[in-house]
Image: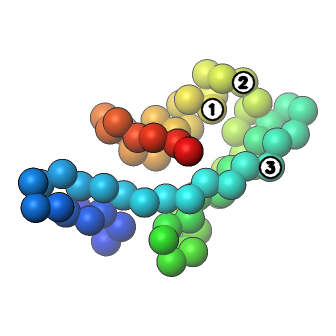
Amino acid sequence: MNKFCKPKADGIVFKNMFVGMDVHKNYLQVAVLDEKGKVLNNSRVDNNLIKVNEFFDRLHPRSNTKVR
């Protein structure tokens, strides 16, 4: 478990991240921050659904992550 994960009494771990995206015609510039504002990831992602999904899958694989 890393320092960004919070264990709960039932053993489930939640990780709060904030994502900002600058949308361009051919790519997205995506920044991911933790609760304290530390940049965890700053990436350029091709502007297509497959690449965007791959990016989010790499952030927290095998999870039921929700993006709001």
What amino acid is at disc 2?
Asn
Residue drawn at 76 percent across, 41 percent down = 28
Taking the image as shown, residue 58 lies to the left or right of residue 45, namely left
Q: Mark 1 touching mark 3, by CB under 8 A?
A: no
Q: Is residue 47 visible?
A: yes
Q: Mark 2 touching mark 1, by CB under 8 A?
A: yes
In the rendered structure, find residue 1 and report the number of the disc placed on it. none
Q: Position of residue 53 (x, y in %)?
A: 56, 29
In the rendered structure, find residue 48 and report the number of the disc placed on it. 2
Q: Name above or below for residue 46 compared with residue 32.
A: above
Q: Position of residue 33 (x, y in %)?
A: 56, 65
Q: Name above or below for residue 61 compared with residue 18.
A: above
Q: Position of residue 57 (x, y in %)?
A: 46, 35
Q: Using the image as rendered, state which of residue 28 and residue 16 is in the foreground.
A: 16
Q: Name above or below for residue 49 compared with residue 27.
A: above
What amino acid is at disc 1?
Val
Query: Tag 3, which secondary structure?
Result: strand
In the rendered structure, find residue 52 and report the number of the disc placed on it. 1
Q: CA distance from mark 2 to mark 1?
A: 6 Å
In the rendered structure, find residue 22 and report the number of the disc placed on it. 3
Specify few, some or many for label 1: CA neighbours under 10 Å numbering under 14, 14-19, or 20 or more.
some
Residue drawn at 10 percent across, 61 percent down = 9
Residue drawn at 53 percent across, 31 percent down = 54
Q: Position of residue 8 (x, y in %)?
A: 17, 61
Question: How is colour applied across the structure in the image?
Answer: rainbow
Q: Using the image as rendered, state which of residue 44 and residue 6 is in the foreground.
A: 6
